[in-house]
Image: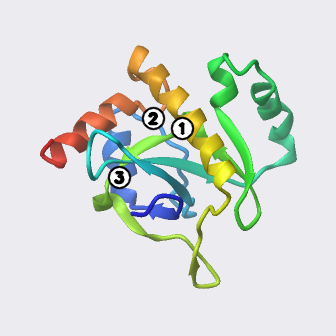
Amino acid sequence: MKQGYFYIIKDEFFEKFTAMGCRFKYNKNAARPTYCCFEDTKHKGLFWAIPTGTIENKNLNRIQKYLDCDEKDIRSSYYHIGYTNRKALFYISSAFPITDKYILREYTTNGVPLELKRVKMQNDIRKKLLKILTYENQFPNKLEPHITTVKSVLLRELGL
């Protein structure tokens, strides 16, 4: 995987971890692009992925309430509205660790791998993700994806 690109995750990943009680932004009938934010600084081969989706007007008011929270409030980091090849919603509180083993393929648009090129947006998303990961360290498995559970399984698989 390369930082800043989008990928489609294998069903095997979601099936395996859903059976362990983890919940994901996942639709088996439609491949959801997932943003590869960055490789973990402590564990080579472990990456942090953020599900993305389109912005629907019916959800925008609810999401805006989170975005309007004070920056010190963890809820302000739950989402990020940005632009890829179209306006996109990044579900940062639904982020999860991932390894190459569970990548089906790159997400492409017109045959070209989709890359998030805007450095400021990358930095804003990364900052929010780091807040979410700090929160997860304080309150393991409190968020839907059960990040701590997924991470420990993947680290075992990597032999770390």
Pick the quarter of the image with the N terminus: bottom left
Residue under label 2, please give it: 145
Tell me which numbered mark, 3 or 2, is placed earlier along the sequence. Answer: 3
Cα–Cα span, label 3 and label 2 = 12 Å
For label 1, the SS is helix
**Residue 93: image location, x then y, percent:** 57, 33
**How dense is the environment of label 3, judged by Cα within 10 Å: few (below 14), some, or many (20 and up)?**
some
Question: Left or right: 73 with respect to 144?
Answer: right
**Residue 68: image location, x then y, percent:** 81, 25
Residue under label 1, please give it: 94
Asked if 69 appears above or below 60 in the picture, the reply is above
Would residue 139 be seen by someone viewing this image from the given angle? no
Q: Which residue is drawn at 25% across and 44% down?
A: 154
The amino acid marked with disc number 1 is Ser
Nearest the viewer among 103 and 1 is 1
Check if mark 3's residue and mark 1's residue have beta carbons within 8 Å: no
Tell me which numbered mark, 3 or 1, is placed earlier along the sequence. Answer: 3
**How dense is the environment of label 2, judged by Cα within 10 Å: few (below 14), some, or many (20 and up)?**
many
Give the number of the disc on residue 47: none
| Residue 152 occupies quadrant | top left
**How dense is the environment of label 1, judged by Cα within 10 Å: few (below 14), some, or many (20 and up)?**
many
Q: Which residue is drawn at 34% across and 42% down?
A: 41
Tell me which numbered mark, 2 or 1, is placed earlier along the sequence. Answer: 1
For label 3, the SS is helix
Residue under label 3, please give it: 13
Question: Left or right: 104 with respect to 109?
Answer: left
Cα–Cα span, label 3 and label 1 = 15 Å
For label 2, the SS is loop
Check if mark 2's residue and mark 1's residue have beta carbons within 8 Å: yes
